[in-house]
Amino acid sequence: MDDDVIVQGDILALYNTPLKPGHAAAFSEDCDSASTKVVIRGAGNQYNYIGYLDYKKERIRKLSMKASTCSFNPGVFVANLTEWKRQNITNQLEKWMKLNVEEGLYSRTLAGSITTPPLLIVFYQQHSTIDPMWNVRHLGSSAGKRYSPQFVKAAKLLHWNGHFKPWGRTASFTDVWEKWYIPDPTGKFSLIRRHTEISNIK
């Protein structure tokens, strides 16, 4: 899990996500019904493969991956570590990370995520899915509230992916995140709030 999430459901249910035979991981796809499709200005669609990979590059085209394939969010996923090791997934990911440094295979309009592209390549049509309520995301893609309070309350996991983090000045549903906030005993880290002082947070 990423560090910008809050778990509201029983984590055992996520742990017990069934993976299909031969699959090393399960992700929540960006085209699922729980999360709204995101369009980044100047970057195009960030819910399919063409939003993350440079299809002008021959190496990418040779993989014969459909550009319109729905992408997935790696901020929350379940892995079968036995299968992961058997398929040498880590080595495969590192291979594509190295090739990107050498050849620039990722989309230049990528909206900040450099971890997603190698995973999309390695797990193309080879991954299971998790319940989309276990990765209700895009809470950090804008300062406004894109979901109703009722939906947020029902979500099993909330994900503030994007630029507006819940510990920053402007973010949606910061009140939900603050319920689980534990002050840093060293005093080095504190919440940044525009209208709320840290001493008032209960």
Image (spheres, rainbow, N blue to C red):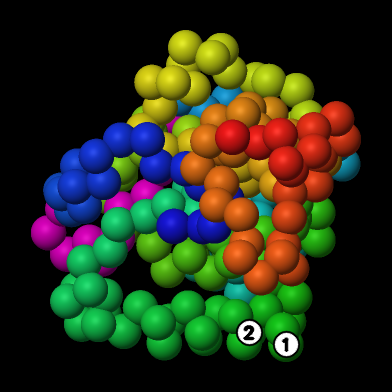
Left or right, 4 with reference to 124: right
Magenta stretch holds residue 135: no
Classify residue 34 by image quadrant.
top left
Residues at circles 2 and 1 in contact by the CB criterion of under 8 Å: yes
Q: Secondary structure at mark 2?
A: helix
> Which amino acid is tagged 2?
Leu
Q: Which residue is painted at 24% across and 39% down in the image?
A: 10
Q: Which residue is painted at 58% across and 25% down in the image?
A: 36
Of residues 71 and 154, the one nearer the viewer is 154
Residue 42 picture location, percent across and down: 87, 41
Total marks drawn? Answer: 2
Left or right, 51 with reference to 66: right
Of residues 164 and 42, the one nearer the viewer is 164
Quarter of the figure with the C terminus: top right
Question: What residue range appears in magenta?
Answer: 20-32
Q: Which residue is painted at 68% across and 20% down in the image?
A: 145
Badge 1: few (under 14), some or many (20 or more) residues near its Cα, within 10 Å? few
Residue 144 picture location, percent across and down: 75, 23
Which mark, residue 92? none
Give the distance between the C-alpha atoms of the residues marked 2 and 1, in whole angstroms: 5 Å
Q: What secondary structure characterizes most of the magenta part?
A: loop
Q: Which residue is painted at 37% across and 50% down in the image?
A: 27
Q: Secondary structure at mark 1?
A: helix
Left or right, 100 with reference to 80: right
> Which amino acid is tagged 1?
Glu
Q: Name the residue beneath numbered marker 1.
A: 102
